Image (cartoon, grey):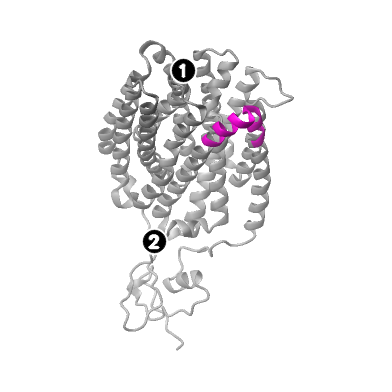
């Protein structure tokens, strides 16, 4: 995949990021006149990631059957249709109808966007191999640019054209991109050169010889402790970022910040995200131990919550909130790239004969956890802020992140000395040795395998001692 095809792949995420940040910045302001509560806005915000959360697992499971190019094209086209549907909310005058349309369109949008994101991560991992972390970072940088451009440009377009016109334009762009990407991306994104495991299960002389092992499933992946701990860090990342989204614009209004100032405030996290993705991660973080990077980023993310609040004794000033917002974007990027890299490499290490398939599954789990945090965050933040106050909620989230950072470090040290799933140490193992390494307690009955069923057809079959 050349650079132009890579940018084309990233363009769909760029457009959806603009739409998402416009939604975050202006939805509460557009419909607050109808008396819609903060909790209701929280549920509307949560519908998108809740839908994407479960859809990503389905996409990851069946992506290889449907084809990555077709999955991406369908997701891009239907995302555009959802934008057009959402734009109709500004023409309604009933609060009930507005809430119903917003919930439905956001849920449908989550389903379609999950197809775009899950497929994109799988394609980048397959096409760039050992350099995937670098291109994950650039991919997130393009998303960060979209998030930064969205509120700034959207603020001006919102002032001149209104709420609906913005989403109509962006929806049309996504629909246009769908066939362009399908016919422009190379066919190499569909496959990766690999040899599927040809080991047979124990069988009698009368049983038919099986030619391949069953494919890996999600349950087998999450048995790896490192995989699961890294996935949880993704959920915490988005939870911490999203918990204040439904109420932040209202908090800034209380501090007499203008509508355009609110849009610029949401740009700040995108600038931190962009700086981290273009400068820090490719040049520094990519060369370090990724587990240590995850633990450090979680802890620093916790301290930034004290600034976002801001929490006593930090003064109640927009300046400190802006600094905190920049740091949120900076460390959030690390908690996107490092965990997904650890998850994919961990699954590929344990299942080297099914790399392409476990990459799809790992991408699905990554998007699932990402949207899990993004689902719980707005609901938790809007409800708890109405009960305890915005500053108290920021303090609670900060303590949660710092504690998990310490727990993640200790658990990774503990589990690094143990083996979650017996790894295959060499790709040159024979079929009998490969099966025996994964089934040490079962007596091997593979001695009768013919040479054509082994990975190296030049090795003669081993004779049975029996």
Please report whichever mark, 1 or 2, sits nearer to the chain's N-terminal start.
1
Q: Are marks 1 and 2 in contact (CB under 8 Å)?
A: no
Give the class, few, some or many, for how many residues have Cα within 10 Å of label 2's Cα (few <14, many ≥20).
Answer: few
Q: Which mark is residue 362?
A: none
Residue at image point 35% right, 30% down:
101
Q: Secondary structure at mark 2?
A: loop
Does residue 394 belong to the magenta stretch? yes
Q: Main secondary structure of the magenta part?
A: helix
Residue 431: quadrant of the picture: bottom left
How far apart marks 1 and 2 lie (CA) works out to: 46 Å
Residue 183: quadrant of the picture: top left
Residue at image point 39% right, 53% down:
356
Give the class, few, some or many, for how many residues have Cα within 10 Å of label 1's Cα (few <14, many ≥20).
Answer: many
Q: Is residue 215 left or right of residue 284?
A: left
Does residue 300 belong to the magenta stretch? no
Q: Quadrant of the C terminus?
A: bottom left
Q: Quadrant of the N terminus?
A: top left
Q: Is residue 151 visible?
A: yes
Label 1: which residue? 152
Q: Position of residue 413 (x, y in %)?
A: 66, 53
Q: Position of residue 434 (x, y in %)?
A: 46, 69
User: Which segment did they paint magenta?
Assistant: 379-396
Q: Please determine whether, in this image, residue 100 is positioned above or below residue 199.
A: above
Label 2: which residue? 215
Q: Secondary structure at mark 1?
A: helix
Q: Please determine whether, in this image, residue 13 is positioned above or below residue 118.
A: above
Q: Nearer the viewer, residue 38 or 345?
A: 38
Callout in the foreground (1, 2): 1
């Amino acid at each position: 995949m050349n650079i132009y095809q890579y940018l084309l792949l990233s363009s769909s995420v760029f457009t959806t990021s603009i739409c998402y940040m416009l939604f975050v910045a202006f939805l509460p302001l557009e419909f607050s006149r109808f008396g819609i509560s903060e909790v209701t806005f929280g549920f509307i915000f949560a519908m998108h990631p809740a839908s994407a959360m479960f859809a990503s697992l389905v996409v990851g499971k069946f992506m290889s059957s449907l084809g990555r190019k077709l999955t991406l094209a369908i997701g891009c086209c239907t995302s555009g249709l959802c934008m057009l549907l959402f734009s109709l909310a500004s023409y309604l005058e009933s609060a009930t109808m507005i809430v119903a349309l917003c919930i439905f369109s956001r849920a449908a949008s989550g389903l379609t966007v999950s197809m775009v994101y899950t497929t994109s991560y799988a394609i980048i991992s397959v096409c760039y191999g050992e350099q995937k972390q670098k291109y994950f970072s650039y991919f997130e940088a393009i998303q960060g640019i979209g998030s930064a451009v969205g509120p700034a440009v959207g603020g001006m377009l919102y002032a001149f054209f209104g709420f609906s016109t913005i989403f109509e334009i962006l929806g049309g762009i996504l629909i246009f991109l769908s066939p362009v990407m399908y016919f422009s991306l190379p066919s190499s994104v569909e496959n990766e050169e690999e040899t599927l495991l040809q080991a047979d299960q124990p069988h009698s002389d009368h049983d038919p010889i099986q030619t391949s092992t069953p494919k890996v499933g999600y349950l087998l992946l999450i048995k790896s402790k490192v995989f699961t701990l890294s996935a949880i860090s993704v959920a915490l990342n988005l939870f911490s970022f999203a918990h204040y989204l439904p109420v932040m614009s209202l908090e800034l209004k209380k501090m007499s910040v203008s509508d355009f100032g609110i849009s610029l405030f949401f740009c700040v996290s995108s600038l931190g995200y962009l700086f981290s993705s273009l400068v820090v991660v490719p040049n520094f973080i990519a060369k370090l131990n990724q587990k240590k990077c995850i633990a450090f980023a979680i802890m620093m993310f916790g301290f930034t919550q004290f600034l976002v609040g801001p929490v006593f004794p930090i003064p109640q000033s927009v300046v400190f909130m802006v600094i905190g917002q920049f740091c949120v974007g900076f460390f959030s990027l690390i908690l996107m790239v490092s965990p997904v890299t650890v998850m994919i490499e961990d699954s590929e290490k344990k299942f080297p004969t099914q790399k392409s398939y476990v990459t799809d599954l790992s991408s699905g789990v990554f998007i699932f956890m990402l949207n899990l945090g993004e689902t719980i965050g707005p609901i938790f933040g809007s409800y708890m802020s109405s009960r305890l106050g915005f500053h108290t909620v920021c303090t609670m989230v900060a303590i949660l992140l710092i504690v998990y950072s310490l727990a993640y470090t200790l658990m990774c040290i503990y589990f690094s000395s143990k083996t979650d799933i017996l790894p295959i140490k060499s790709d040159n193992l024979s079929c009998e040795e490969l099966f025996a390494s994964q089934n040490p307690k079962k007596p091997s009955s593979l001695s009768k395998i013919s040479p054509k069923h082994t990975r190296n057809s030049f090795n003669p079959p081993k004779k049975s001692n029996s």
